[in-house]
Amino acid sequence: MPHIKLFIPGPIEVSPKTLAAFSKPMIGHRSNDFKKLYAAIHPQLQTLFGTKQPVFLSTSSAWGVMEGAIRNLVSKKVLNCMCGAFSDKWLDVSLRCGKQAEGLKFEWGTPVDPQALDAKLSSGEFDAVTVIHNETSTGVMSSLKDICAVMKKHPETLLIVDSVSSFSGVPIPMDELGIDVLLTGSQKALALPPGLALFACSDRAFERAATLKDRGYYFDFLEFKKNQADDMTPSTPSIGHIYALQSKLEDIFAEGLEARYARHAKLNAMVADWVVRNGFEFFAAEGARSKTLTCVKNTKEIDVPALNTRLKERYHAMIDGGYGKIKGKTFRISNMGDETEETIGQLLGWLDDCLKG
Ligand SMILES: *Cc1c(COP(=O)(O)O)cnc(C)c1O
């Protein structure tokens, strides 16, 4: 039996090459071999992040670093921009960390409104903001350029950006934009197995962290910084993930970053054409649609679970049936990772067939 190929927005299909790297024999995490491995991939990671800052590897899913960012950066009060399931949850996580926190809510399907953010920050009560660049639940991509322009007017407020489902699918030049924490996870556009998070911090973020007492240990950003200076991680990392990442970086730089971004845009446009051709609509507002996945408004009220069952049985593939409160009212198709015009074309053909019943 072939495996079920995942066209859900994470985890996504992992290539045989990556899986082979993931299962290489272990090395000691304090050995020279490990240091060489981390040092070898580090410049490529910096290029991908668009930063001169160190890039850290956390053996956790993205939420570990999302929580860590709150614990390391929030002193007074955090403003959590909310426009979907993941960004809404970040308010809850901030409160669970014992921080003062408030949500800035936007309707699901709409992006973060930079003007509303500007107005809210003018109160001066916030020293950190969280933004999810690509709200995976709604298929909405907010404009980091516009958000970062607003942040420049509020220099005491640090910006934490989750790029979990957009990272490496679209350019995110961290230093140029002035992002203070940029974080991502392994199982989305990077097409690695789940369980690794990657992040980088600005100097301002490190300075803030140094003033905060309750950073804990596992996600203490200053521990990551100290260890990275010796090409190591604070605790034993998932070494398999780092080998898989090395293999994936080879792929990414062989393709070229611009070509990779263009490929994601092209495949996303193919899915968008399919949506329109079949008389569906987009859940995301016009102009704010994600480039790495499509959240389709189920305007024709099709039976999404039945469609997915047919897709699995006939073609050993699956899409996503919608997330949280819009499950069934929407469905989502990922175009992240290693997909090509051929594989996305194939999927859309399969969907056409399965839609017939
Ligand atoms: C998937 C996802 C997360 C959560 O990642 P975990 O790996 O489950 O921690 C967070 N934010 C966004 C935008 C995501 O798509």
Image (cartoon, rainbow, N blue to C red):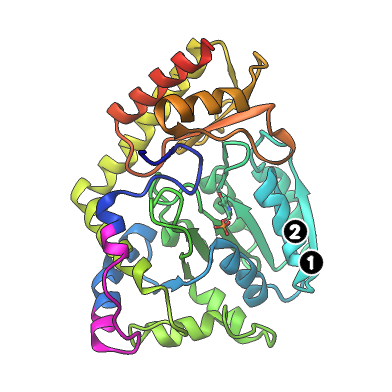
Q: Residue 37: x percent and y percent?
A: 26, 76
Which label sits on residue 91? 2
The residue depicted at 35 percent of the width and 39 percent of the height is 2
Instruction: Kindly tell me whether residue 285 is visible in this rendering.
Output: no
Query: Which quadrant of the figure has residue 83?
Result: top right
Instruction: Kindly tell me whether residue 84 is visible in this rendering.
Output: yes
User: In the visual, does 170 lie left or right of 124?
Assistant: left
Residue 32 is inside the magenta segment: yes
Ligand 1 quadrant assignment: bottom right
The kind of residue on which mark 2 rests is: Leu
Q: Is residue 342 above or below residue 20?
A: above
Query: Which quadrant of the figure has residue 282?
Result: top right
Mark 1 vs 2: CB contact within 8 A: yes
Q: Residue 266: x percent and y percent?
A: 35, 29
Q: CA distance from mark 1 to mark 2?
A: 6 Å
Q: Nearer the viewer, residue 81 or 124?
A: 81
The residue depicted at 48 percent of the width and 26 percent of the height is 311
Q: Residue 253: x percent and y percent?
A: 22, 53
Which label sits on residue 95? 1
The residue depicted at 53 percent of the width and 48 percent of the height is 144
Q: Which residues are magenta?
A: 20-36
Q: Residue 318: x percent and y percent?
A: 48, 34
Q: Nearer the viewer, residue 334 or 79?
A: 334
Q: Is residue 160 above or below residue 332?
A: below
User: In the visual, does 49 lie left or right of 199?
Assistant: left
The residue depicted at 48 percent of the width and 49 percent of the height is 11
Q: Secondary structure at mark 2?
A: helix
